[in-house]
Amino acid sequence: MSQFIESIKVEDQKIFLLDLHQSRVNKTFEHFGKQGSLDLAAVFKNLDHNEDGLYKLKITYDLDKNVRTQMIPYAISEIDKISLVENNVYDYSFKFEDRKELERMKQKAKADEIIIVKNNHITDTSYSNILFKKGKDWYTPSTYLLNGVQRQHLLKNKKIKEAEITTQNLKEYSHFQIINAMNDFDDMFIYPLSKITNLPETSEYLQV
C-alpha cells in the first residue's frame, strides 16, 4: 500500500499551518476512496515532545491509518548548485513517501537542488515550491507539481502572486527563493537568478 508523508513545522512546541496540512490529508483519503481521515492534531497531542527550538514533525501514514512519526531538529541549508531539469511526465499530485524519481533526477543533474521543467513550464524543486522576484513582487508558478501548504498560505495572505513562468520568460525575474512547510520568506536565502547553472539561453537544460 502507498505511503504518504506530511512534514510539519513545530517551533517552541507550537505547530504551524495545521489546518492546511489536515486539508491535504483529508483530500488524499478522499481521492483514493477511503472513508474518514487521519487526525493530525491528535497525533501531535500524543507526542512526547517538550523541547523548544525548530523541529520538523514527519508523519508517515497509509490509507489504513497506520502512522509513524519522527521529530527531527531542523536548520535551513543553503543551496550551492541548482539546475533546471526537464521531465514532461513526472506527477507528484499527492505527497507520496516514495521520492526515488526525484532523487534520480537530482543525481543525474549532479546538483544540490533541481528545478523541474514540465512542457517548458517551471514547476517545483525536488522538495519545495519556488518563488521568483520581478520588481518588488514575488511570484510562484501556476504550474506547480504539489500545491504546498506554505504556497497556499502565502497566496491566501496576498504575500505572493501566481504567474505562468516558463523557460521563455524566466529571465524576466531577478531572484528566487524556495518555500515549503518549514521555510517561509527568508531574506537570508534569496538567490540571484544567475545561481541557476543552466539557464536556457546559456545552455540546454538537462533532460532526464
Image (tube, rainbow, N blue to C red):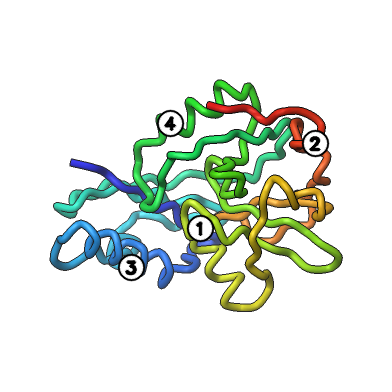
Circle 3 residue? 41
Circle 4 residue? 101
Residue 24 position within the rendered picture, expressed as x and y whole percent measured from the top left: 36, 63
Nearer-N-terminus badge (1/4): 1
Nearer-N-terminus badge (1/2): 1
Circle 1 residue? 9
Foreground label between 2 and 3: 2
Residues under labels 3 and 4: Cα distance? 31 Å
Q: Residue at x 20, y 57 (%)?
A: 32
Residues under labels 1 and 2: Cα distance? 38 Å
Residues under labels 2 and 3: Cα distance? 48 Å
Residue 145 position within the rendered picture, expressed as x and y whole percent measured from the top left: 48, 51
Residue type, label 1: Lys
Residue type, label 3: Ala
Q: Residues within 10 Å of mark 1 (few under 14, many from 20)?
A: many
Looking at the rendered structure, the secondary structure element under dot 4 is: helix
Looking at the rendered structure, the secondary structure element under dot 1 is: strand
Q: Residue at x 41, y 45 (%)?
A: 91
Q: Quadrant of residue 35?
A: bottom left
Residue 180 position within the rendered picture, expressed as x and y whole percent measured from the top left: 56, 55
> Does residue 17 appear left or right of residue 113 in this picture?
left
Nearer-N-terminus badge (2/4): 4
Circle 2 residue? 201
Residue type, label 4: Glu
